[in-house]
Image (cartoon, rainbow, N blue to C red):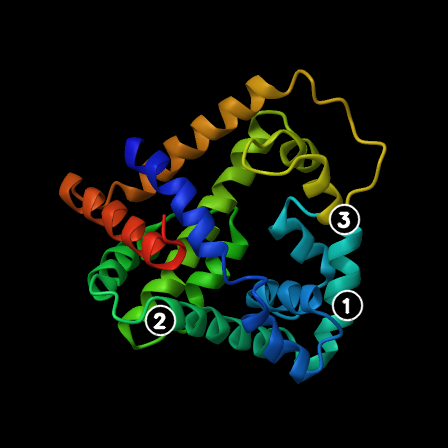
Amino acid sequence: MATAARLAPTVGHLGGAFMLDPAVLGPGKTAGYPGGFSYYVVGRGGVLGDVDASVVSSAFGFFAPGLIRSLWEAGLPVEGARAGADRYTEGCADWGRARLAGWSAAGRTAEILERVVDSADDSGMALFAGWRAQSRPTDAVGRAYVLIHVLRELRGGTHLIASLAAGLSPLESVLVNPSSAGVEQAKRFGWTEPFPDTTGCGPAMTAAEATTDALMARHLAVLTDAELDELATNVESARRIVFGD
């Protein structure tokens, strides 16, 4: 569990940094998407295929269903789900290539990450399964960065399951998650006031985080202790290259 907990903040920050970056959203707007957030929803959720918005909302988990429906239905006609997902995947790879050029650990990181994600149990995690099935770049840096994002989707799906098991609704999870901006994050995710009282939800969130780490440790168990340390060290080096911290 120690490595799972160690990886969580770095993978969450680094693996999701491309998602709403103007450099990634720009090509979507050029392609005809009505807005960057619509492209994000179709690009990220397009791995699920041409489905009803309720399926996407279920997989995303923490967003208000009404927001996901409006953005999915506005963006889907541009090029369809699969093409949107492929465009977004390439945007993810390009973002990594631009910021991690020369990252010497990229090839080895990709090799280790593939062992983790390809062996992970995807039960109940359609979004992760969809991203795992996406074609992967052949270059080391692009491949490694896309796989960091896929690992992020694995943890995200795991955390959604753990949060629900702890008795938290998706909205409550957003409001009390220590890594989010609480009320402001909830509003960005499309939820509207009045919000529920989450005064007593702290212990449930603590339990959800512990369960997430425990489940992620099972996914990471395909690696030796030395490989676990190597993976964490390599991903942290990538974070320092990108963010300087």
Quick one: SS at disc 2? helix
Q: Which amino acid does label 2 sit on?
A: Gly
Residue 38, above or below 60: below
Residue 122 makes an appearance in the image: no
Residue 79, above or below 44: below
**Label at residue 142:** 2
At x 14% / y 43%, what residue is drawn? 226
Location of residue 128 in the rendering, given as x and y in whole percent from the top left corner: 48, 55
Residue in front for this viewpoint, 117 or 34:
34
Location of residue 117 in the rendering, given as x and y in whole percent from the top left corner: 35, 54
**Label at residue 204:** none
Residue 199, above or below 90: above
- Residue that badge 1 annotates: 73
Q: What residue type is labelled 1?
A: Glu
The part of the image, by quadrant, that contains residue 200 is top right
Quick one: SS at disc 1? helix
- Residue that badge 3 annotates: 190
At x 65% / y 63%, what residue is drawn? 41
Q: Around disc 3, counting alpha carbons within 10 Å, would you say few (fewer than 14), some (14 to 19), or many (20 or more)? A: some
Q: Distance between the residues labelled 2 and 3?
A: 32 Å
Q: Distance between the residues labelled 1 and 3?
A: 15 Å
Image-based side of 46 in relation to 153, left or right: right
Quick one: SS at disc 3? loop
Q: Around disc 2, counting alpha carbons within 10 Å, would you say few (fewer than 14), some (14 to 19), or many (20 or more)? A: many
Q: Which residue lies furthest to the right in this view?
A: 194
Residue in front for this viewpoint, 94 or 158:
94
Quadrant in the picture for the N terminus:
top left
